[in-house]
C-alpha cells in the first residue's frame, strides 16, 4: 500500500537575481515498509524534495503539486497539524548529527523530549524509554550513555542517537538525507545495517537520499535518479544497476571507480560525463541532459521527454533509452 | 635502486591540547612513528579513516606543521628542521593540492595570477613569457585560456580543482602532495579530475603522495598503498597486492565495508561490520592500536605492539600484525569476500 504519494511536485525559489526552478514535476510513491532511494549529483533537488515533504522549505519557495501521506495532502494541511505529523508519523535524520543535536542537553534528555512532546510521557518514563531506544539503535551501555552529552560521542554514535530520536514515536516514514555521508565506511556499514534492521523490526518505510551509488546498492529496494530537478529514471535497485536505461544513469555508473575492478593497464581511464549541469535559473525546454548526451539529436534538443515505462516498474525520461547493446 | 624522491623516517606529530576540565595538557598522537619512501615517478596512496593522521603526515612533509620527531628527506636533503625562510624555496620541489577547491584559492586574484604566482615567486619565467606559460598550463588541465581573467567564485568546483592542479604543477615539482583532491566533488567531476591526474602523472612523471579516505580512488590512481590507523601505518604494499591480498584485519575490514555500486553483488557480499569506535588518539590503546575493534584479537595483541615488517617473498608487502605469519599467512576475517562480478 502506498504511504506517501508525491505528484507533480515543483518548487521555485525567489532569489536576489534569477528565480531557481529547483524541482520540476516530480512524482513518486513510497510504499509501506519500503526503502526507496533518491540519488543524483549535487544540486539536483534531493534535499529540496525532502524539505518539501517535511514542510521545511523557506518562505522564498513557491510549491505546487501534491504530497499525500495516507491520503492527507501535506501541502494544504494547517501548520499546526503538519507540526504534529512531523516528528511523529513523519520523521527525519540529516547528514550532520552534531548540528541537529543540542550540545547543552544530555542525549537522554533530547530523546526523552521528543517522547514527552509527542507521546505525553512522564520524565521518568521518557528516560526509561530513551534507554530502550539507545539500546535498539545499537549504542553500547545505554544506561551510561543516556547521561552523556553529544560531544562525548563519536560521529557514528551521534548518528545513532539521531536515529533513536527519529524512530522514538514509531513513525510511518523516515526521511534520511545523506545519513552516512559524514561518516567513515566502517561506521557507515553499521548505520546502513541499522536502518535495514529498523525497517524489518518496526516496519518503518524509509526515503533515503544519497549521492553514493554504493549506498544505494547496499540498502535500497527501489531507486529514483534525479537530474537538474527532474526524475529521469526509476527502477528496482537490481534492475537499475543491471539494466540502466537513461544515458545519465549509465554515465554515473561508469564514472565511479570500483574496488578490485581496476584496469591493469597504466592508461586506463574512468568514463567522464562531459559538460556541466544546466542552470536552474533558465531550465531548457528540451531534455535537460541533451547538451551532455552522446545520443542527443534534433528531437532531444527540442522537446522534453516524458517518463514512460520501458518495462513494468522501470520508467525512464529519455527519447533514446537502453543500454549500449540495445541502443544503436 | 634509484634514490627516493622522498624519504620519511619515524615521523611523529603530537599536538598538545587543553583537556578541558583540568588545567593539564593532553597529547593528541596524530602521527606516531610513520616511515615510508616514494621513488621517482611513483604514486603512493595514503589511505585511512578520518582522524587517522593522513593530512598531518602531508602537512609535516610540506612543513606546514613542525614535526615532533623523525626525519623528512627530500631529494637527499634533510628538510625536517629547515628554518622558516628556507621553506618557501622548497615549493619548487614539492607542491600541493588540497581538498577544498573553494578555500584553497585566493578569492581576490584572477585565475591567471593564481596559476602564474609560483612561477613569479621563484623567478622561473620572465614577464613576457609568463602569460604564454599560464595559457599553456590552463590548456594542460583542459581549461580555456580565456578563463584566466575570471575569479575563483565564477568557476565550478571541478574547474577550481583544475586551477589548483595547474598552479601546483607550474613549477614542475618532482613531488606533488594531493590531500583528498576529489573528495568534495561530484562523481562525474571526480572522474575527470582523476583521469587528469593520471594522465598528467604519466606524461610529466612526477612523484605523488595521494592522501584519500576513498579506497576505490586510491586503487585507481596509486602504484603503492599505505593504510593508516590511529597515527600509524598498519599495512603497505603495491596496489594489486594490497587490494587482492590484504593481510591486516583492519585493511580487510575496510575493504569489505566499501559498498560496491552493484545491487546484486553488494547484497551477496559478506561484510564485516567492526564494532566499537575508533579510539581517541589522546589515549591510544596499548599493544596493537587496532585490538579494541579487531574481530580476531588475541591476548598478545593487547600487550605487545606489532612492528611493521616485510612478509618474505611477497614483493615489498609490509604489515604490522602479530597474527600474520612470516610468509604472509593471515587470518581471513571475511572468510568469503566474494567481490563484484
Ligand atoms: N533556499 C534556497 N534558495 C534558492 N535556491 C535554493 C534554495 N535551496 C536550494 N536551492 C537550489 O535548489 C537546487 C536543489 O538543491 P538541493 O539542496 O535539493 O540539492 P541536493 O540534490 O540536495 O544537492 P546536494 O547533494 O549538494 O545536497 C540547487 O540548485 C540549490 O542551489
Ligand atoms: N592542529 C591540531 N591540533 C590538535 N589536534 C589536531 C590538529 N590537527 C589534527 N589534529 C588531530 O590529529 C589527528 C589526525 O588528524 P588528521 O591528520 O587531520 O587526520 P586525517 O587527515 O587522517 O583525517 C586527529 O585526531 C585530529 O583531531
Ligand atoms: Mg542535499
Ligand atoms: Mg584529512
Image (cartoon, grey):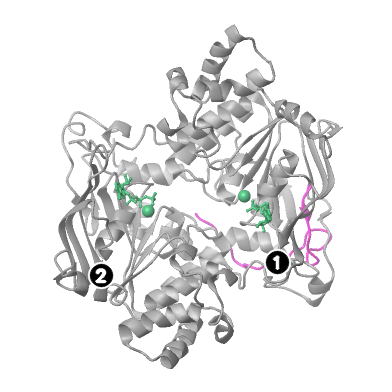
Image spot of residue B52 (x, y percent): 67, 56
Chain at tag 1: B
Q: Which residue is mark 1?
A: B19
Q: Residue at x 52, y 64 (%)?
A: A188
Image spot of residue B213 (x, y percent): 59, 51
Chain at tag 2: A
Q: Kindly identify which numbered label has been placed on residue A31.
A: 2
Query: Circle 2 — which element?
Result: strand
Rendered-image quadrant of the N terminus of chain A: bottom left
Q: Which residues are magenta?
A: B315-341
Q: Quadrant of ligand 2?
A: bottom right
Most common secondary structure along the magenta stretch:
loop
Image spot of residue B329 (x, y percent): 77, 63
Say if mark 2 contacts mark 1, CB within 8 Å: no
Q: Going by the picture, which residue comes out furthest to the front?
A: B23
Name the side, left or right, on which A241 lies relative to B277: left
Crowding at label 1, few (<14), some or many (≥20) Cα neighbours within 10 Å?
A: few
Q: Nearer the viewer, mark 2 or mark 1?
A: 1
Q: Residue at x 47, y 20 (%)?
A: B148
Q: Residue at x 20, y 31 (%)?
A: A301
Q: Image quarter for residue B331?
A: bottom right
Query: Circle 1 — which element?
Result: loop
B322 drawn magenta: yes
Label 2, label 1: how far apart the Cα atoms are: 49 Å
Near-viewer residue (A88 or B127): B127
Amino acid at each position: 500500500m502506498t504511504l506517501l504519494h508525491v505528484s507533480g511536485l515543483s518548487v521555485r525559489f525567489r532569489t536576489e537575481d534569477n528565480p531557481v526552478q529547483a524541482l520540476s514535476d516530480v512524482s513518486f510513491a513510497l510504499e509501506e515498509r519500503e526503502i526507496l532511494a533518491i540519488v543524483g549529483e549535487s544540486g539536483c533537488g534531493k534535499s529540496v524534495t525532502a524539505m518539501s515533504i517535511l514542510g521545511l522549505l523557506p518562505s522564498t519557495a513557491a510549491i505546487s503539486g501534491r504530497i499525500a501521506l495516507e491520503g492527507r495532502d501535506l501541502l494544504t494541511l494547517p501548520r499546526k497539524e503538519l507540526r504534529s505529523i512531523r516528528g511523529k508519523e513523519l520523521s527525519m535524520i540529516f547528514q550532520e548529527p552534531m548540528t541537529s543535536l543540542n550540545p547543552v542537553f544530555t542525549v537522554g534528555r533530547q530523546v526523552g523530549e521528543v517522547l514527552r512532546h509527542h507521546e505525553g510521557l512522564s520524565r521518568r518514563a521518557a528516560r526509561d524509554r530513551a534507554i530502550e531506544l539507545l539500546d535498539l539503535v545499537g549504542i553500547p551501555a545505554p544506561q551510561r550513555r543516556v547521561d552523556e552529552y553529544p560531544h562525548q560521542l563519536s560521529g557514528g554514535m551521534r548518528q545513532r542517537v539521531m536515529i533513536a530520536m527519529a524512530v522514538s514515536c514509531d513513525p510511518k516514514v523516515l526521511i534520511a538525507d545523506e545519513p552516512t555521508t559524514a561518516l567513515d565506511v566502517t561506521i557507515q556499514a553499521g548505520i546502513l545495517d541499522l536502518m535495514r534492521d529498523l525497517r524489518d523490526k518496526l516496519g518503518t518505510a524509509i526515503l533515503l537520499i544519497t549521492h553514493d551509488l554504493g549506498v544505494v546498492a547496499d540498502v535500497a529496494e527501489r531507486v529514483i535518479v534525479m537530474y537538474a530537478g527532474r526524475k529521469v529514471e526509476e527502477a528496482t535497485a537490481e534492475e537499475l544497476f543491471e539494466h540502466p536505461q537513461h544515458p545519465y544513469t549509465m554515465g554515473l555508473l561508469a564514472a565511479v571507480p570500483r574496488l578490485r575492478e581496476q584496469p591493469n593497464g597504466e592508461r586506463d581511464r574512468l568514463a567522464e560525463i562531459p559538460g556541466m549541469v544546466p542552470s536552474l535559473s533558465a531550465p531548457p525546454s528540451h531534455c535537460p541532459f541533451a547538451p551532455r548526451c552522446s545520443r542527443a539529436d534534433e528531437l532531444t534538443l527540442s522537446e522534453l521527454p516524458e517518463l514512460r515505462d520501458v518495462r513494468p516498474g522501470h520508467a525512464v525520461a529519455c527519447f533514446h533509452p537502453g543500454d549500449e547493446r540495445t541502443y544503436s | 635502486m634509484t634514490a627516493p624522491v622522498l624519504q620519511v623516517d619515524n615521523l611523529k606529530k603530537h599536538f598538545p591540547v587543553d583537556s578541558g576540565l583540568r588545567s593539564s595538557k593532553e597529547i593528541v598522537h596524530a602521527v606516531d612513528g610513520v616511515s615510508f619512501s616514494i621513488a621517482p615517478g611513483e604514486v603512493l596512496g595514503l589511505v585511512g579513516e578520518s582522524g587517522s593522521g593522513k593530512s598531518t603526515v602531508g602537512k609535516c612533509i610540506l612543513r606546514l606543521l613542525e614535526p615532533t620527531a623523525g626525519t623528512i628527506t627530500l631529494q637527499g636533503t634533510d628538510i625536517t628542521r629547515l628554518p622558516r625562510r628556507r621553506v618557501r624555496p622548497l615549493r619548487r620541489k614539492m607542491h600541493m593540492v588540497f581538498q577544498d577547491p573553494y578555500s584553497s584559492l585566493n578569492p581576490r586574484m584572477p585565475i591567471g595570477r593564481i596559476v602564474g604566482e609560483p612561477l613569479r615567486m621563484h623567478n622561473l619565467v620572465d614577464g613576457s613569457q609568463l602569460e604564454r606559460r599560464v595559457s599553456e598550463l590552463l590548456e594542460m588541465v583542459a581549461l580555456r585560456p580565456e578563463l584566466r581573467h575570471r575569479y575563483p567564485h565564477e568557476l565550478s568546483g571541478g574547474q577550481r580543482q583544475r586551477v589548483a592542479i595547474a598552479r601546483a604543477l607550474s613549477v614542475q615539482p618532482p613531488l606533488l602532495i594531493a590531500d583528498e583532491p576529489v573528495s568534495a566533488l561530484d562523481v562525474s567531476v571526480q572522474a575527470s579530475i582523476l583521469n587528469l591526474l593520471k594522465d598528467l602523472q604519466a606524461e610529466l612523471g612526477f612523484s605523488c603522495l595521494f592522501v584519500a579516505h576513498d579506497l576505490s580512488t586510491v586503487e585507481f590512481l596509486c602504484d603503492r598503498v599505505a593504510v593508516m590507523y590511529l597515527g600509524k601505518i598498519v599495512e603497505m604494499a603495491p596496489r594489486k597486492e594490497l587490494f587482492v591480498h590484504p593481510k591486516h584485519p583492519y585493511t580487510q575490514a575496510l575493504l569489505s565495508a566499501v559498498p560496491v555500486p552493484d545491487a546484486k553483488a553488494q547484497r551477496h557480499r559478506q561484510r564485516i561490520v567492526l564494532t566499537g569506535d575508533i579510539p581517541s588518539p589522546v589515549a591510544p590503546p596499548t599493544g596493537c592500536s587496532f585490538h579494541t575493534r579487531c574481530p580476531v584479537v588475541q591476548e598478545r595483541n593487547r600487550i605487545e605492539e606489532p612492528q611493521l615488517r616485510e612478509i618474505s617473498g611477497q614483493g615489498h608487502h609490509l604489515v604490522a600484525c602479530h597474527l600474520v605469519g612470516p610468509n604472509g599467512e593471515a587470518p581471513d576475517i571475511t572468510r568469503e569476500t566474494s567481490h563484484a562480478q
